[in-house]
Amino acid sequence: MDKSKSVEKLKSVRDVSGIPDRESIISLGRSVLEKEAAALVDLEKSLGDDFAAACLTIFTETRQLVVTGLGKSGHIARKIAATFAATGTPAIFVHPSEAGHGDMGMIAKGDVLLVLSNSGNTPELQPVMKYARKLGVPIIGMASRPTSKVIQFADIALLLPNVWEACPENLAPTTSTTMQLALGDALAMTVMEMRGVTRKDLRKLHPAGAIGLALTPVQEIMVTDPDRLPLVSHQAGMPETISVMTSGCFGMAGVLDTSGALVGVITDGDLRRRFGLLETAFAHEVMTRTPKVISPDMLADEALAFLNDNKISATFVVEDPSAGHQPPLGILHIHDLLRLGLN
C-alpha cells in the first residue's frame, strides 16, 4: 500500500467508534518497545560470572553447540544456533520433541548444550538435558525462574530478569523472547571476538548474499586486462594522455615511470587546473604525484568507503599502498561496485 494512503487510513480510524485513534495506536506501539528496551537494560546489568563461564565453555569445549527450545523459545533457539554457525562456532538446533524420536543422536560427547525456556519447566526439554548429562555434555540453561528445572539442572545458569511480557495479558512471549535473542547475540558475538574471527573469516562463511558481496576482495572485482587499463608514460604528450582518458571510461589515466611503476594520476580536475599547458605539456607535468591507491586485499565495502571518503570515482590497485611506487595491478571504478549492488 502507498505510504500516504496508509497514513490516511490511520488518520481515519479515529472517526470509527470503538477503534483507537492514530495517536493511541502509536502510543501502544511505543509502550511495547519501552517495556522491551527496559528489559534489555535489566538484562545488561545482570550479566556476570555465569555469562563469562558460558562463553568460556562454548569457546573451549565445543565440538559443536547444540541449541534447543520449544515454542517461541524454539524459534529463538534456531536463530541463536544460526548466528553462532555464521560467526565461527559450529552450531545446530535440535527440536526437543524430535529428539525423543531419534534426533537425540545429534548430541555427542564434546558438545555443549544450550537450553532455552522462559518458564524453565517445559517437559519436552527434560529428556534432552538428562541425555546430555549422561554423556558429560555441559548444559547452559537460559530461563527466568531460578527454581525451574532448566536452571536447577544446568551446569551454568543464565537467569533472565523476571519481568512482565509486553503482552497486555502477560501471556504472549514478547519481552522474554527479546531478552533470549539479545542474550544469544551477546554470547555469539563475545565468543566470536574470543576466537579472533575476522572479516575475511566471515566471508568464508558468507560466500553469497549481501554479506558475501561486501566482503569480496578488490582483486576479484578490479579490471586487470592490460588493454583496458588507462596507462601512459610519464613522457607522453597530453593529446595522447587525453585520448587514453576518454577511451578508457575511467575518467583518469595512470602515469608510469621507465620501470613501469605508477608515479602519478591525471584526472579531469588536473586537466582543468592546467588547461593552458595541455597543448605542450607532458604527462609528468600535469599529473598528481601522490595518487590514492588501494591493495587487492581490501574488501569491497571498504573500497567503496575509500572512494566516497576521498571523493574520487576510480583508483588504481597496487600490491602494497604503503611501499612507494609500484606497478599497477588493476583499476577499480565505483560503478563496478554499484553494479554489484553495494551502496
Image (tube, rainbow, N blue to C red):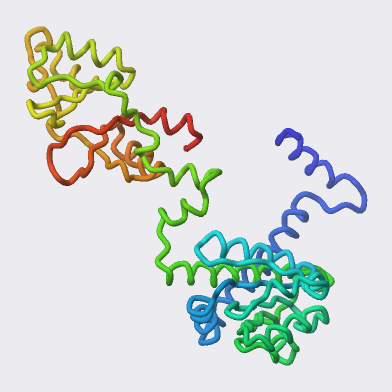
Query: Is residue 212 depicted above or below 106 in this figure?
Result: above
- Kindly identify the residue that appears in the image at 38 percent across and 45 percent down: 299
- Kindly identify the residue that appears in the image at 81 percent across and 68 percent down: 172
- Kindly identify the residue that appears in the image at 74 percent across and 68 percent down: 74
Left or right: where does residue 260 sit relative to residue 99? left
Q: Residue 267 appears at what percent x and percent y?
A: 23, 23
Q: Residue 160 appears at what percent x and percent y?
A: 65, 80
Q: Is residue 233 visible?
A: yes
Of 164 and 268, nearer the camera is 268
Q: Residue 76 appears at what percent x and percent y?
A: 69, 66
Q: Report which quarter residue 329 is drawn in.
A: top left
Left or right: where does residue 252 sit relative to residue 42? left
Q: Report which quarter residue 118 is drawn in.
A: bottom right
Q: Is residue 42 visible?
A: no
**Furthest-right residue in view?**
17
Q: Residue 228 appears at what percent x and percent y?
A: 30, 20
- Kindly identify the residue that appears in the image at 68 percent across and 88 percent down: 133
Query: Is residue 112 depicted above or below 5 in this figure?
Result: below
